[in-house]
Image (cartoon, rainbow, N blue to C red):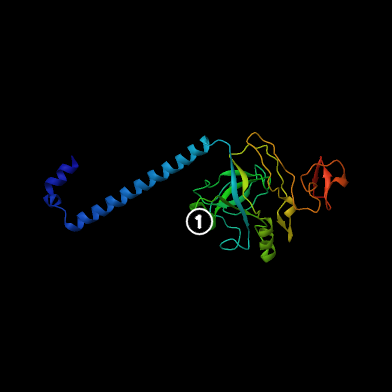
Amino acid sequence: MLLEKELLCCPSIKTAPTARDKGYLESQYHRLLHRIITMLSTTLLIASAGLLGVAQACSTVSGVAVTFYGYPDNDPPGPATAYNCGGRNNIAGGVGTYDNPLTFASDPSEYTPCELVYSSYLKKYLRMEDWCQQCVTDWQSGKKHIDIWTGSSTSNGGQTQINCENALTPGSGQQFIRAPPNNLPVDTTALFSNGQCRTGNVYNGNTASCSGGGGNTCQTGCSWAGHCIGCPCTTFDDCSDNFICTNGKCANP
């Protein structure tokens, strides 16, 4: 009723909008439309990611190229990651357990951000928390590639750490398990710590399965073939170098 009276008393309100008015209204309309489309797209993307996570079943992937990176050769140098997973606030870390997985980087088209995988080569659980340019390039050419975090999140290991990363890198593709069970064997030994490179805590050629457990864990590269880390033993004398016999397997002291 009030609007009717206003229109009767003020006929100038009924004048046609100017070109400027039309331009303003049109720009506001397009801005609103863009915001609606953006909100819908984001909602659909989140919903799709959630459904994918629910639907994904455990599976094995073989022939994956494995490299390592850390504080000194991150880009930029430091512990920052591209994705905030598990409340880490975009800081790399982890020890390799199911509940505290180690950070890895890859192409987000190859692995979903925050996706959990299991590395048979390291006997560690890993989580996709970072982006890797070389991984993206490799994936576009059909090559599978994962770059795994090593070392401290608070100190720069310098060239010594980079040398360790190169020493840890296997010469052949390795097996990974996607959507893994939580009962796979785990080695929580830090691969680089206090200047020490733990090349004895990798398991080249090791395999695992979605049903849990592990396959061949007998490593190579020690001075007495067949008596390296992970190889069967009954006494201390059955193990090469300074390894000891623990639970029927040669291991680091």
Taking the spot 49% from the left edge, 53% from the top edge, the residue there is 141
Residue 43 higher or lower than 149, as above or below:
above
Left/right of residue 68 with respect to residue 110 in the rendered view = right
- Tell me which corner region of the image, top left, top right, bottom left or bottom right, holds residue 248: top right
Neighbours of disc 1 within 10 Å: few (<14), some (14-19), many (20+): some
The front one of 99 and 30 is 99
Q: In the rendered view, tell whether residue 80 sits above or below residue 236.
A: below
At 12% across and 48% down in the image, what residue appears?
9
- On the rendered structure, is 228 left or right of 5? right
Q: Residue at x 70, y 40 (%)?
A: 185
The outermost residue toward the top is 211
* Image location of residue 82, percent across then percent down: 53, 54
Which residue is pictured at 63% across the width and 51% down the height? 172
Q: Could you tell me residue 23's position as x and y percent?
A: 22, 56
Q: Secondary structure at mark 1?
A: helix
| Residue that mark 1 sits on | 137
Left or right, 46 with reference to 195: left
Residue 98 in which image quadrant: top right
Amino acid type indicated by mark 1: Thr
Q: Position of residue 156 (x, y in %)?
A: 66, 63
How many marks the image carries: the answer is 1
- Extreme-front residue of the structure: 225
In front of the other: 116 or 251 = 251
Q: Name the foreground residue: 243 vs 205.
A: 205
21 on left or right of 218: left
Pick whichever, 210 or 224, lies toward us. 224
Quadrant containing the N terminus is: top left
Residue 47 vs 68, above or below: the answer is: above
